[in-house]
Image (cartoon, helix red, strand yellow):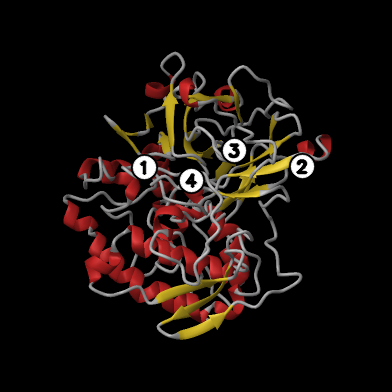
């Protein structure tokens, strides 16, 4: 959830650094932008060292878009062993995989979360083999809690599945996808044919439309990244899919999750505002429903009112050596069903910052009475969802260089206590103190474990 909460975000010239952020100044300093840009913070097993190799490789099995391929564990290994190992059970290095299938006949979408294990290890429980619809169109999205995740194929699996990890010579960083544009084309055809209808977003408790993944009250410096997949990790570091059967079979196993914008929306912001995410059948957990990146994107495309937040050219994940790059912007947008642009001006970061400034602070302040009594995605950094979101806005404004682009200083400032935990925020001089509660309202599907917490670094 804040799918993320961490440091600098994905891709480009900035890399995530997995470290626990304790803010010591009274007001969030400028350096915060280099360390907190993400949306989410992740729990971490105490047995793992604070420093971890941030660059890993994920080995994609043969025929990954088939039922058998999806049920074959994807394997994590260090990109350069000289920099240390990569272990899936270490939340600073965890990689996540999420698949979606659409039935071209009925238009129904289902979600399946393939398992990731260390190369050379075995799963705690063998993955469920999904039952895919006949002629299903399948796509895969990847998320990572480190800095750079590279994909490595097996017997041509990357080309077979149309996998995209960035552009030649420059990967996105934490995210990648396989066959996503084809999946979204099928989904949009189903929508046009009346076979698939993304549910209405509804009205929040504040009287405003519920936010979507493309709402300027939710986005950060690198929107639409990472997935809602969760895994179970046993005390000895073995991995299993997050299913009801595995929860019962593996008592004491810890939940491991990918810090993501989707998780922040689906598991924190939505329930705090009285909204509900779109869920569909979970092919890996019979009888259960699942959220998913493609669901959030399709719903946002169908219902987000203007202004619509789309990946800007200045998003750190689409930069190439710190420079704007049209090819990379479009490669990223294609994986999340966003319109491609003919030139960089059509993906203006200045326009993005202007809309962020016009929408974000006002909605955060409007909803403060709801979010300040809701659990923080990262208690080690903020004492409520409200202060977490305020802190995240400050980092985003800095990383996108919005002050220079708009000519306006950040209207939000955050105050922390002696332990570095954000406790209040000021909006243009209006203070909205976040009151501590012994028992804050918790998300209905909390991905936060009770193990020591570490910030999810965003290597953007």
Give the alpha-carbon distance from disc 4 to disc 2, as whole Å.
23 Å
Vertical position of residue 83 compared to residue 170: above or below: above
Tag on residue 459? Answer: none
Give the residue number, with chain letter if any, for mark 2. Answer: 244
Q: Is residue 208 visible?
A: no
Q: Residue at x 42, y 44 (%)?
A: 459
Q: Earlier in the sequence, mark 1 or mark 4?
A: 1
Q: Residues within 10 Å of mark 2 (few under 14, many from 20)?
A: few
Q: Residue at x 49, y 39 (%)?
A: 146
Left or right of 152 on screen, residue 117: right
Give the residue number, with chain letter if any, for mark 4. Answer: 226
**50, 319: nearer the viewer:** 50
Q: Earlier in the sequence, mark 1 or mark 2?
A: 1
Q: Residues within 10 Å of mark 4 (few under 14, many from 20)?
A: many
**Quadrant in which residue 420 is drawn:** bottom right
Q: Residue at x 41, y 37 (%)?
A: 176
Q: Earlier in the sequence, mark 1 or mark 3?
A: 1
Tag on residue 11? Answer: 1
Q: Position of residue 261 (x, y in %)?
A: 49, 54
Vertical position of residue 199 compared to residue 439: above or below: above
Q: Is residue 123 visible?
A: yes
Give the residue number, with chain letter if any, for mark 3. Answer: 112
Q: Quadrant of the N terminus?
A: bottom right
């Amino acid at each position: 959830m804040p799918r993320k909460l961490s440091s600098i975000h994905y891709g480009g010239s900035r890399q995530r650094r997995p470290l626990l952020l304790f803010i010591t100044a009274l007001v969030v300093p400028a350096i915060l932008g280099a360390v907190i840009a993400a949306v989410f913070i992740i729990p971490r097993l105490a047995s793992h060292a604070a420093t971890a190799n941030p660059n890993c490789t994920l080995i994609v099995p043969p025929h990954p878009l088939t039922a058998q391929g999806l049920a074959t564990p994807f394997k994590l290994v260090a990109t350069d062993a000289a920099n240390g190992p990569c272990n899936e059970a270490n939340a600073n290095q965890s990689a996540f995989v999420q698949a979606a299938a659409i039935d071209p006949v009925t238009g129904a979408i289902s979600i399946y979360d393939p398992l990731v294990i260390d190369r050379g290890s075995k799963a705690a429980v063998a993955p469920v083999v999904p039952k895919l619809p006949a002629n299903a169109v399948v796509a895969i999205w990847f998320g990572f809690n480190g800095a750079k995740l590279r994909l490595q194929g097996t017997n041509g699996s990357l080309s077979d599945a149309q996998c995209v990890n960035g552009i030649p010579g420059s990967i996105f960083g934490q995210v990648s996808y396989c066959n996503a544009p084809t999946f979204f084309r099928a989904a949009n055809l189903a929508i046009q044919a009346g076979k698939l209808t993304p549910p209405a977003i509804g009205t929040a408790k504040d009287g405003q439309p519920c936010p979507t993944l493309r709402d300027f009250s939710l986005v950060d410096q690198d929107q639409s990244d990472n997935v809602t997949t969760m895994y179970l990790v046993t005390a000895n570091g073995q991995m299993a899919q997050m299913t009801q059967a595995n929860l019962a079979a593996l008592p004491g196993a810890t939940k491991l999750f990918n810090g993501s914008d989707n998780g922040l929306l689906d598991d924190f912001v939505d329930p705090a505002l009285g909204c509900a995410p779109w869920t569909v059948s979970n092919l890996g957990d019979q009888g259960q429903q699942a959220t998913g990146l493609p669901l959030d994107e399709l719903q946002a495309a169908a219902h987000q009112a203007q202004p619509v937040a789309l990946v800007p050219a200045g998003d750190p994940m689409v930069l190439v050596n710190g420079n704007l790059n049209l090819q990379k912007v479009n490669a990223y947008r294609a994986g999340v069903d966003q319109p491609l642009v003919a030139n960089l001006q059509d993906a203006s970061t200045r326009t993005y910052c202007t809309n962020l400034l016009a929408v974000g602070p006002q909605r955060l302040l409007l909803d403060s009475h709801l979010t300040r009594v809701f659990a923080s995605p990262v208690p080690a950094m903020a004492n409520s969802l409200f202060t977490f979101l305020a802190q995240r806005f400050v980092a985003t404004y800095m990383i996108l260089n919005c002050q220079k682009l708009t000519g306006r200083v950040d209207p939000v400032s955050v105050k922390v206590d002696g332990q570095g935990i954000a406790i209040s925020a000021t909006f243009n001089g209006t203070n909205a103190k976040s009151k501590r509660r012994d028992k804050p309202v918790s998300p209905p599907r909390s991905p936060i474990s009770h193990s020591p917490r570490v910030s999810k670094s965003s290597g953007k």
